[in-house]
Image: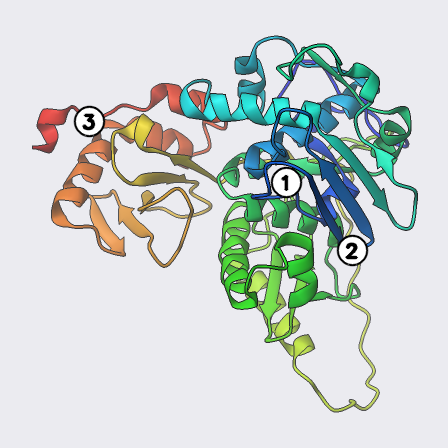
């Protein structure tokens, strides 16, 4: 799931393109519904929603695959199958290689969790049916050994029928967005669904309106109280908008409306076979455009008497660019093991702003209600939020030691998390006393 020198094998009707290196191919049915976050260690888990029936049976001697790594690893396997066009997915014997490819930590508890979830996935019996079709097994049982205990396998085989359906229903997701949302399973699920379900925004496209119970059936559980699910969903929606700010939403007591922002979206998609010269990049939809779109959605959700017919002039036709623009990751989160700070630091892009700022949150999830914005010029100053004096002094000292890195990310001279992580400096302990 990372950039590779090998160009992918794209779904039928598309050709390969270097821009696809930032694409992760996923199955449309798995974008519609969520895998389990927590599930019984044994037995069968099933979800039936949005014309999808997904069933997972735990393998012998292991628990059900759950959580964020089950999602990211399944995306990794599907992406590898689409790129190669081969039912046999070569994983290799080193879990560290897989961890690097999905942008995860390559040691400690995270690596052990990744390894455990891959073992669970490989041993599980997963079936999926969509749009009234038959239930298909995802993994070919012939690839499992019946004589040894479940363990890490160097290759996994998909069934031929599922591979054909995967290539036909492949959905392009943005790798930088997935990495930005990796710490929230609900945000990962929500992004995958929005990216696969929302049509390109324009004046003629209707809003996608989904009831809260429908959303809970897709992404929650029947045992979860509706109010608790709604609170978590709204938080995840905020996280997705931070990482992928190309849609608007409006919430009502019984439903939520979504619409993708009009204009070009910087999401890597397969390029047509014949490509003209790429046009100059166009500006993204700004906050004012998204606010206007959100106002339209709220109006659609508000019951109105039947309006009298009105003559609406045709909007001017604006040519769309025929080739996608490369994805530029907008934020990157630096956690305690990198910075030495108890808080999480979020580096930002300039996006037309003059004053360099960083953002700080108490945990790994981006929450605007608990976020502190710190301007760095002419001196470090808290603009929004409030850290205690000692915490602020530590963050300011860290920012001073890492100012070159902050500026390079701000000015878009960096785009890879690995390069950022390799340059992060921790403030020496005596400077914090």
Comparing marks 1 and 3, which lies closer to the viewer? 3
- Give the mark nearest the N terminus, 3 or 2: 2
Q: In front: mark 2 or mark 1?
A: 2
Cα distance, mark 2 to mark 1?
36 Å
Density class for disc 2 (Cα within 10 Å; few <14, some 14-19, many ≥20) is: some
In depth, the one of 82 and 64 nearer the eye is 64
Q: SS for tag 1?
A: loop
Residue beneath disc 3: 427
Q: Nearer the viewer, mark 3 or mark 2?
A: 2
Q: Which residue is mark 1?
A: 281
Q: Secondary structure at mark 2?
A: loop
Which image quarter is the N terminus in?
Answer: top right
Q: Are marks 2 and 1 in contact (CB under 8 Å)?
A: no
Q: Is residue 28 left or right of residue 431?
A: right
Q: Position of residue 52 (x, y in %)?
A: 80, 49
Of callouts 1 and 3, the N-terminal one: 1
Q: Residue at x 91, y 29 (%)?
A: 161
**Which residue is at the front of the view, 144 or 194?**
144
Q: Which of the 4 quarters of the picture holds residue 126? A: top right
Where is residue 132 drawn, in percent x and y? 91, 50
How many angstroms separate mark 3 from mark 2 (CA)?
50 Å
Q: Is residue 218 above or below residue 161?
A: below
Q: Is residue 97 above or below residue 329?
A: above
Query: What residue is disc 2 on?
Result: 50
Q: Is residue 295 left or right of residue 259?
A: left
Label number found at residue 243: none
Q: Residue at x 69, y 54 (%)?
A: 218
Residue 162 place in picture, x, y as percent: 86, 31
């Amino acid at each position: 799931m990372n950039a590779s020198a090998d160009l992918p094998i794209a779904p039928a009707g598309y050709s390969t393109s270097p821009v696809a290196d930032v694409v992760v191919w996923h199955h449309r049915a798995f974008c519609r519904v969520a895998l389990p976050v927590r599930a019984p260690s044994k037995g069968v888990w099933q979800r039936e929603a949005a014309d999808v029936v997904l069933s997972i049976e735990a393998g012998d001697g292991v628990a059900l695959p759950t959580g964020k790594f089950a999602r990211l690893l399944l995306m990794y396997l599907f992406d590898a199958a689409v790129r190669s066009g081969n039912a046999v997915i070569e994983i290799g014997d080193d879990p560290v290689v897989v961890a690097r490819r999905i942008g995860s930590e390559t040691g400690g508890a995270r690596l052990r969790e990744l390894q455990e979830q891959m073992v669970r996935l490989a041993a599980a019996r997963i079936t999926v049916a969509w749009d009234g079709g038959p239930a298909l097994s995802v993994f070919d049982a012939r690839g499992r050994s019946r004589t040894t205990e479940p363990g890490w396998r160097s290759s996994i085989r998909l069934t031929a029928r599922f591979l054909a359906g995967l290539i036909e229903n492949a959905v392009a997701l943005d790798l930088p967005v997935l990495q930005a949302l990796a710490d929230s399973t609900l945000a990962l699920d929500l992004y995958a669904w929005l990216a696969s379900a929302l049509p390109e925004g324009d004046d003629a496209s209707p809003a996608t309106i989904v009831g809260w119970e429908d959303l809970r059936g897709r992404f929650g559980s029947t045992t979860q109280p509706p109010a608790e699910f709604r609170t978590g969903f709204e938080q995840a929606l905020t996280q997705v908008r931070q990482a992928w700010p190309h849609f608007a939403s409006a919430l009502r007591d019984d439903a939520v409306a979504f619409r993708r922002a009009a204009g070009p979206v910087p999401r890597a998609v397969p390029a047509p076979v014949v490509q003209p010269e790429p046009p100059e990049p166009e500006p993204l939809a700004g906050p004012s455009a998204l606010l206007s779109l959100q106002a339209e959605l709220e109006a659609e959700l508000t019951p109105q008497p039947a309006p009298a017919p009105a003559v609406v002039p045709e909007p001017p036709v604006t040519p769309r660019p025929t080739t996608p623009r490369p994805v530029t990751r907008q934020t990157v989160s630096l956690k305690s093991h990198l910075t030495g700070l108890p808080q999480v630091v979020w580096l930002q892009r300039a996006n037309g702003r003059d004053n360099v700022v960083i953002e700080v949150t108490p945990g790994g999830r981006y929450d605007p209600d608990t976020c502190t914005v710190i301007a760095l010029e002419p001196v470090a100053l808290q603009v929004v939020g409030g850290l205690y004096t000692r915490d602020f002094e530590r963050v300011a000292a860290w920012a001073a030691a890492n100012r070159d890195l902050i500026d390079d990310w701000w000015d878009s001279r960096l785009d890879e998390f690995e390069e950022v992580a390799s340059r992060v400096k921790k403030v020496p302990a005596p400077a914090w006393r």
